[in-house]
Amino acid sequence: MTRTPAFRRATRRLTADAALLVVAAAFVLPLAWVALSSVDARADLRAKLPDEFTFGNFDAVLVPDVTFTPLLNSLILCGGATLLTIVCAALAAYPLSRHRSRTGSAFLATILFATCLPITAIMVPVYALFVQVELIDTMHGTILFFAASQLPFAVWLMKNFMDGVPKELEEAAWTDGASPMQSLLRVVLPLMGPGIAVVTVYSFVMMWGNFFVPFMLLLDPAQMPASVSINDFFGNRGTVVHGQLAAFSLLYSTPVLVLYVLIARRLGAGFALGGAVKG
């Protein structure tokens, strides 16, 4: 039987759709387990409809020591580090984008190499350094390391977005007497809102889910973020309170979802600045 081109195209399309459904199931099933188990009084490892519907799992975790304090610590750590990362990345990316030099390419290559270094490979010397400079078990020390770990990729991203802002707009501002810093703050950054939004989301999400860094650098349980305190739901000998773990996971994911919603419009916007320098 001869297969026509239309039959082959339909077969490839069905194969691609089946593969996408498998990938979608790999993401949907864990989310379904979290949503269903959070209201199941007898939750286990199976994704199933609740045997006994209850909000008791949320009542058990909605207490200061379990949820509110760790989430507040996470917001302080990740929010402060994200703000510091955005400011430093913008200041570092501006000369890389606007001034060409012989060392620019080598510097960018070094930045890309820095993003490849695993955190686990540098935590031992970082821990020793933090002990020496008395930054261990401090929120501001952890914020500084969070920002430093995200800065290389943030600079690289920010520089690429900044390249999309026409330099002619800055030159017009310079003609009116603006300084380079003023043109950066009043011309470049307002026009690269989507880029700032991307760097903000990426940096915040990477810090929000980081377990190893705060686990190593913070010692006081009262300062632990939610990414570390979630480990408390895993008991001895493999016992897990599945319902409470699922409820806490939903609450833990809420700030990231809120961040996505708040800047969704900025992420979907484009630069479209080509016509701004014509005429």
Image (spheres, grey):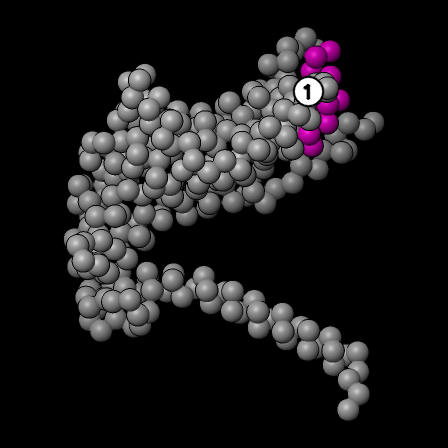
Direction right: furthest residue:
279
In percent of width and height, residue 58 lies at: 21, 55
Q: Main secondary structure of the magenta part?
A: helix
Residue 162 relative to residue 243: left or right: right
- Let me know if residue 15 is in the magenta part: no
Residue sitting at 19 percent across and 68 percent down? 42
Tally of numbered tags: 1
Visible residue check, residue 75: no
Instruction: Judge by depth and name the residue closer to the eye, 24 or 134.
Output: 134
Q: Which residue is mark 1?
A: 103
Q: Is residue 234 left or right of residue 168?
A: left
> Looking at the image, which residue is at 30% across and 30% down?
217
Span shown in magenta: 163-175
Residue at (38% x, 41% y) in the render: 210
Residue 238 percent location from the top left of the image? 21, 59
The spot of residue 277 in percent (x, y) is: 77, 27
Is 262 rendered above or below residue 90? Answer: below
- The residue lying furthest to the bottom in this view is 1
Q: Secondary structure at mark 1?
A: loop
- Image quarter for residue 212? top left
* Place of residue 138 in the rendered image (x, y in percent of width and height, measured from the top left): 28, 24
- Whether residue 210 is situated above or below residue 237 in the rendered picture: above
